Image (cartoon, rainbow, N blue to C red):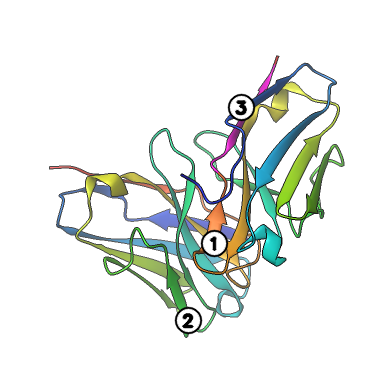
Amino acid sequence: QSVLTQPPSVSGAPGQRVTISCTGSSSNIGAGYDVHWYQHLPGTAPKLLIYGNNNRPSGVPDRFSGSKSGTSASLAITGLQAEDEADYYCQSYDSSRYVVFGGGTKLTVL
Amino acid sequence: QVQLVESGGGVVQPGGSLRLSCVASGFTFSNYGMNWVRQAPGKGLEWVAYIRHDGGSKYYADSVKGRFTISRDNSKNTLYVQMNSPRPEDTAVYYCAKSMYAYNWFDPWGQGTLVTVSS
């Protein structure tokens, strides 16, 4: 049972917009700690996608965006492409557990 | 470019010991905190441990506290995790990842090294 809750899977057709939610509590996201997002393809190193709730590292397309409100955060992907098919994880800090990850969401491009 | 390369994975018996290493290059290693994160087969990412840039603070996940020890040698740009008394549930790909502080983002990550705990 992960401290941060994500939907196990989401899907969308090419060109569509999908969102992935990340729900925490008052000891992590709700306490004001930032949320970060990663893209992970099997057999590869996880890749930083969004840091500090809504910032994109250089090289990450602006199709990816993040937001945070209250005890939750979201990752939005617009103009879905086949190459976006991967696992996505949110990460934050918890006042009693230190670093916490969401359980991961598998994105399928239909 | 910034790079992290893990090594030391393999098969270890329950109750044995294993040390993983992570060699860093392309940045001033002694200025950054470092982490170990693992992914068990078919599971998600699980944070394991963090060490501050100077080794002065160390944090552990409850699942490994008292069994794993994170350390670093800044003169060798190398991060370690000593795994004592491993259990079958410690079987996973272990990644090292750079962050400034424990509450910061992890970037970059290494490619990972597989640890299998089995008799």
Q: Which residue corresponds to mark 2?
A: B57
**Disc 1 sits on a residue from what chain?**
A
Q: Marks 1 and 2: which is nearer the front?
A: 1
In this picture, which residue range is highlighted in magenta?
Answer: A103-109
> Which residue is at the front of the view, A107 or B18?
A107
**How many neighbours does mark 1 have within 10 angstroms: few (below 14), some (14-19), or many (20 or more)?**
many
- Amino acid carrying label 1: it is Val
- Amino acid carrying label 2: it is Ser
Q: Is residue B100 above or below residue A103?
A: below
- Amino acid carrying label 3: it is Ser
Mark 3 vs mark 1: same chain?
yes
Decide whether residue A104 is among the magenta residues: yes
Q: Do the numbered discs 1 and 2 sit on residues whose CB atoms are within 8 Å? A: no
**How many neighbours does mark 3 have within 10 angstroms: few (below 14), some (14-19), or many (20 or more)?**
few
Q: Main secondary structure of the magenta part?
A: strand
Q: Which residue corresponds to mark 3?
A: A9
**Disc 3 sits on a residue from what chain?**
A
- Of marks 3 and 1, which one's residue comes earlier in the chain? 3
Using the numbered discs, state the Cα–Cα distance from disc 2 to disc 3 in whole angstroms.
36 Å
- On the question of residue B1 being in view, the answer is no
* Residue depicted at 70% across the width and 56% down the height: A35
Decide whether residue A50 is among the magenta residues: no
- On the question of residue B88 being in view, the answer is yes
Mark seen at residue A99: 1
Exactly how many numbered labels are in the figure?
3
Mark 1 vs mark 2: same chain?
no
Does residue B81 appear left or right of residue A98 in this picture?
A: left
Report x, y in % for residue A31.
68, 66
Secondary structure found at label 2: loop
Rendered-image quadrant of the C terminus of chain A: top right
